[in-house]
Amino acid sequence: MKKRIAFALLALIFSELCFAQVYEPTAENLENREWYQDAKFGMFIHWGVYSVLGVHEWVMETKSIDKKTYEKLPAFFNPTEFDAEEWVLLAKSAGMKYITITTKHHDGFAMFDSKLSDWDIMDRTVYKKDVIKQMAEACRKHGLKLFLYYSQLDWHHNDYYPRGDTGKKAGRPDSGNWEDYLDYMNGQLTELLTNYGDVGGIWFDGWWDKKEADWQLRKTYDLIHGLQPQAMIGSNHHQAPNPGEDFQMFERDLPGENKGGYSADAKVGKLPLETAETMAHQWGFSLQDKAYKSSKELIQYLVRAAGYNSNFLLNVGPMPNGKIQPEFIDTLKVVGNWTDKYGSTIYGTRGGPVAAQSWGVTTQKNDKIFVHITDWKTNNFLLPTIDGDIENVTDFQTKQKLKHTTNSYGTLVSLPKDRDYDLPDFVLEVRLK
């Protein structure tokens, strides 16, 4: 008996080692990773039939709506004012370089034309148009990359069984075939990766619902990379990256932090990084959610993310009519004005030589270091010691050279006396010799 257990453990370890060694990203994938790290800023879109209720994307779970009752929702979903090009142009004008959109959330409803189920936008709504197809075409037209969110968790599918930590009140039978569900999931991923052109990547969510389940990630990841080698895979599992994943994401947290309570086990790896946050509080459309973040807060979040060597994925939850809330549009216009002026201090950069401080962060591109000061109330600023000799320090906005002296503690910079303390980010450009 002991020998059999030992053999089984060795087999498991060997299998995991093989999984770790098998995946070698292609040249196209590595190139896409580099582009992704340069891009820095993306739009997250949570949209589905749940928007009709105006609560949020978890309403089926939080309100204990059973499957049969929830199936009435799609009949009310008719987003006649949806304009994919309008969304893409809004993202582009805000300085965003890619869009990640929900193709299927935890309610299992597909926002695309799936031939594997009638639980989709084509078969259950009077709208009968493929949202993902429209977004893919608009993104291609305007030069933004499209990433596809896909929920591994499914509260609607009978074969998502045994149940995980959620979806227990959906009224599904206490039986199901897990292997059939995985085949269904892989089938829908195949549809998404063959019917909508090249995509930037797949953004998984929901693994956390059944941490002990055999998700057969290797099979799914190999399928994705086989169909589109450049496609990056990330998973919002709140863990260290798994073999086969190409970027690591953090929900409501900067890499290495755990303020949101999701990232206790998410050790920062060596893959490209991304942090996701919302413009209000909820992800999906919520009529009563008025916790709007200011343009200043969002700009500072974008800046800090870049200083942490991370992308920032900023979420909007469109209304059921297909429009994005006017409050969000107004804020994104202000963010866009900032990226127009200061975008070069984050796009194409990597985290700078000075770790994040209470006053701000640094980013770097070649021999230029950008010092992003988000909280400093005096005219003398001390930049901690960095490697290399400083040739000059300038006010990025006015290009005015600033007086500076370097000693063993760092470089003391005389900031302009008339600078605007209300700016979300005062940027110094430090050029090295």
Image: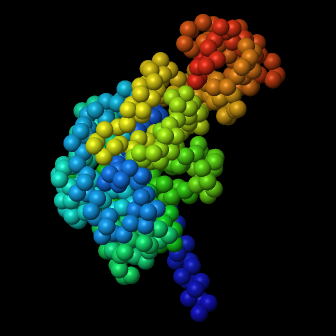
State whether residue 306 is above or below residue 155.
above
| Nearest to the observer: residue 59 or residue 6 | 59
Task: Pick whichever, 16 or 276, lies toward us.
Answer: 276
Q: Residue at x 42, y 37 (%)?
A: 42
Q: Residue at x 69, y 12 (%)?
A: 415
Q: How is the image coloured?
A: rainbow
Q: Is residue 327 above or below residue 259?
A: above
Residue with the most extreme front position = 288
Quadrant where the N terminus lies? bottom right
Quadrant assignment, res 162: bottom left
Can I make out residue 226 in this image? no
Report whether 383 appears left or right of 352. Answer: right
Residue 252 appears in the figure: yes
Report how many numbered discs are placed on residues in the image. Answer: 0
Q: Is residue 19 left or right of residue 82?
A: right
Image check: 245 left or right of 173?
Answer: right
Specify the quadrant of the image occupied by residue 72: bottom left
Q: Position of residue 430 (x, y in %)?
A: 63, 17
Q: Residue at x 47, y 44 (%)?
A: 289
Q: Is residue 108 above or below residue 302?
A: below
Seen at 47% across and 68% down, the residue is: 166
